Image (cartoon, rainbow, N blue to C red):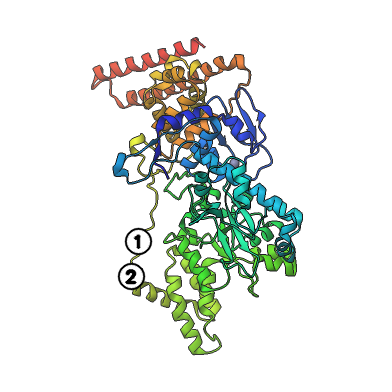
Amino acid sequence: MAGLIKREDVDAVRDRARIDEIVSAHVTLKPAGVGSLKGLCPFHDERTPSFHVRPGVGRWHCFGCGEGGDVISFVQKIDGMGFTEAVEYLADRVGVALRYEDSRTGAAAGRGPREEPGRRQRLLEAHRVAAEFYAEQLFGPGAQAGRAFLAERSFDRSDAERFGVGYAPTGWDALLRHLQGRGFTQAELVASGLVSQGQRGIYDRFRGRLVWPIRDVTGAVIGFGARRLYDEDQGPKYLNTPETSLYKKAQVLYGIDLAKRAIAQQKRVVIVEGYTDVMAAHLSGVETAVATCGTAFGGDHAKVVRRLLGDTTAGGGLQLASGASLGGEIVFTFDGDAAGQKAAVRAFGEDQRFHAQTFVAVEPGGMDPCDLRMARGPEAVRALVDSRVPLFEFVIHTSLRQFDLDTVEGRVGALRSAAPLVAGIRDRSMQLGYARSLARWIGLDTEEVRREVGRAAAASGQGRRRPERRPEPSDAAQGPASGMSAPVLAMPDPRDPVARVERQALVVALQYPQHVPESFDELGEDAFGVPAWKAVHAAVRAAGGARTGRTVGGGAWVEAVVGQAAEAVAPLVTELSVAPVPEDREEAIAAYVADVVRALVDLGLTRRIADAKSRLQRLDPAADPEAYGSAFERLLEIERERRRLRDSA
Ligand code: ZN
């Protein structure tokens, strides 16, 4: 991957990509008040729309599930892309040429020159043309063996078309000539991985094989997987595209383009083993199925999957007390062998949160989804996925299987073998739960099992467990400097009238700075009482106040405030910048804004009056007439100010 994209180019992309257009490709948006659109949230299941988009500020927010952000984060979430990938994707669409920051400049970088601009587009185009070519060949006279392979596995013509399955002709240059005829250069073809370089020139990489187009999340073909069909073929059973600038086998997941929506909605991903298994699963109604391509499921695949599951916590992200949910299920339909479970365990490394989300579904007869669909129909495939058991349980059961639990010796052996597995579970309550289950599975007393688990923990040095990392409890988020740890912000009670006024004032400051009266910018840091809104106000002040909003306007203004907000506060800024405004007549907005700000200022004055009165009560006019007099004077002054404000309304 190239270096960081230059900041101003990211801004240009954000600026030029129209959020309503991008979102509309996935969500049907309807007008919802001035400058606002809403629709059904693509990230959670709902019947009434709570997903709002405000094109004027370039932001979206769902008031149902709490997700929100700008156009880039929308693409990241909906397509499961990383930040850079999403910016590149949008840049392509809106025609921004990206420049990259290279911190290790020049020769010291030790990398080749950056791919020339437009090269990626050419390679994608070559793949698109190749996929089309292969798909046509499948129904030609030479592809008898390919069609037979599919028919034997109960796939018909429309199934083949749905998945874009094709046939690579025998011979050496069928695709090569086709692509050259379309104007692709030799250098482009070599870079694409579609041809191989031999001593006597280049030739087709895939020959006499059934081919599956492998697509990225956006549906663009980036490579192929190819199955041997003929006995005389000396090559491997499956042959894939080599590593290219488009195709990284550690990241690609076959079927991701078809499955991404279902994965995000169902919060579940099913990992199967091959192309035909993905087809069989989808055709059986398991639309969350994907497969790795010619490699085991690894850490990079896990990242892709977590993003699609909507897990934003992987990088220690935000934690809101309102209960931002992470999670979802990752179901492996591996063979029941040790290699399969090791792969699953390894994929998530030490991160036990993901072990806790991982499930295993094994067909007792060892059938894969493709076999299962043929033998027992689509219901059997769905039943297989439904029969999943938690990874921990699966691993423990596997270890018990080697013992005869009908004998004392067998039970003792089973306990000694399984106790370290239970001891390795770091989540305390889950460990206790599994200790109880283990007692039941072996047929032993719970206390005995817990003692053995304790011994195993001590033996492995896990007796001194590190305390679980927990976010610092904090009453409020401070400025951006405190962005190191994500503080938990208590969400204000929406029925609290003070919280409501404070919230509305911030909503209008973010959405309509041009109408916000000067008095708003004169408010000090104690003008807001609710911690969450106080934190947003601090970010607004740090960004220069509403007067800056008036100058820069719209999306750039909200962007500036987000830039000043601590990590846990940024989503609140987004939420407020998209929140519906009760006044939906354009011509009445200015008056509404003025009212809200006046109510806020009034609120602050009322609070100060209460403070001044309480101070007065604590003073003794006889003992210190001077202090009493000036405190009294201050109270009158604030009361006059409030009267002036109210009279001007
Ligand atoms: Zn939602």
Q: What residue type is labelled 1?
A: Arg
Q: Quadrant of ligand 1?
A: top right
Tag 1 and tag 2, C-beta contact below 8 Å:
no
Q: Is residue 475 visible?
A: no
Q: Position of residue 123 (x, y in %)?
A: 54, 43
In depth, the one of 613 and 190 nearer the eye is 190
Q: Position of residue 360 (x, y in %)?
A: 57, 66
Quarter of the image with the N terminus is: top left
Q: Within 10 Å of the Cα at label 2, are there few (<14), some (14-19), or many (20+) other Cα atoms? A: few
Counting residues from the start of the chain, the first of labels 1 and 2 encountered is 2
Disc assigned to residue 461: 2
* Count of numbered marks: 2
Q: From the top left corner, tell me how far across and down residue 627 is, in percent.
A: 26, 19
- SS for callout 2: loop
Q: Is 190 drawn above or below residue 595 in the view shown? A: below
Residue at image coords 59%, 28%: 580
The circle on residue 180 is: none
Q: In whole angstroms, how far apart are the C-alphas of marks 1 and 2?
A: 11 Å
Quadrant of the rendered image containing residue 532: top left
Picture quadrant of residue 62:
top right
Q: Is mark 2 within 8 Å of ligand 1?
A: no
Question: Can you tell which mark lies on residue 466?
Answer: 1
What residue type is disc 2 on?
Gly
Residue 609 appears in the rendering: yes
Q: Which one is in front, 129 or 66?
A: 129
Asked whether mark 1 and ligand 1 are closer than 8 Å, the reply comes as no
Left or right of 429 on screen, residue 483: left
